[in-house]
Image: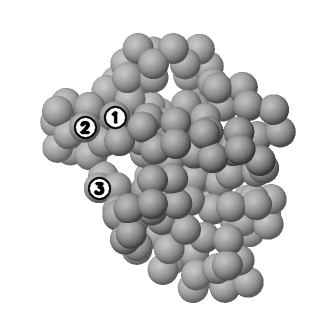
Amino acid sequence: MKVLFVCTGNMCRSVAAEKLLLALGLPGVQARSRGTAAQPYGGLPREVKGFLERAGVADLRHKPAFIAEADVDWADVILVMQNHHYEVLADNFPQSARKMHLFLEYCTGAAGAELQDPMGKGEKAFERVLGEVKAAVAKLAEKQKQF
């Protein structure tokens, strides 16, 4: 299964989900992350880097990337963090709307659940959001193991 995680800047939520899923080493699972407004000059914020290190993620290399049609075509499932990400992708890639889902809803079953952006909101916001990402990725991994 090829999973594409999408957020705004591709510096926090989507990259954390990608790195956490890949660190599990599930057979047949591939992951990428992209942003709807990503700028390639950024890197992982210290809060994200620290969280991923504490979670045991070894590969912390990352360069934010803007979503492209090749990414959308590559993915079997596209998991967006918020409804506005879904809207951007549906407008730009309408042929792939059937494989787009809200990340938390898809992973946890929480209907309509969005994962808010912690950027600029302090360390506690990062810890809360990244904790939600980690828990949702664990549920996604459990689902994948069932197949």
Between residues 142 and 69, which one lies in front from this camera angle?
Answer: 142
Q: Residue at x 42, y 37 (%)?
A: 135
Which mark is in front, 1 or 3? 1
- For residue 121, above or below residue 92: above
Q: What residue do we see at 48% from left, 80% from top?
A: 87
Q: Find numbered disc 2 in the image and state the secondary structure of the residue it sits on.
A: helix
The residue furthest front is: 146
Residue 18's label in the rendered image is none
List x then y, in percent, for residue 70: 79, 63
Secondary structure at badge 3 equals: loop
Q: Which residue is mark 1?
A: 131
The Cα–Cα distance between marks 1 and 3, rounded to whole angstroms, is 12 Å
Of marks 3 and 2, which one's residue comes earlier in the chain? 3
| Badge 1 element | helix
Which amino acid type corresponds to the residue marked 2 in the rendered image?
Arg
Q: Could you tell which of marks 1 and 3 lies nearer the N-terminus?
A: 3
Residue 52 in the image: state x and y as whole percent.
45, 23
- Front residue of this view, candidates 101 and 10: 101
Q: Is residue 38 visible?
A: no
Query: Residue 24 sits in which quadrant?
Result: top right
- How far apart are the two marked residues, 3 and 2, measured between alpha carbons? 10 Å
Q: Amino acid at mark 3?
A: Gln
Density class for disc 1 (Cα within 10 Å; few <14, some 14-19, many ≥20) is some
Residue 47, above or below 95: above
The foreground one among 135 and 30 is: 135
Q: Which residue is mark 2?
A: 128
State the image coordinates of residue 141 (x, y, percent, origin top left).
Answer: 61, 39
Residue 116 numbered mark, or none: 3
Q: Are marks 2 and 1 in contact (CB under 8 Å)?
A: yes
Residue pictured at 34% horizontal, 34% vertical: 131
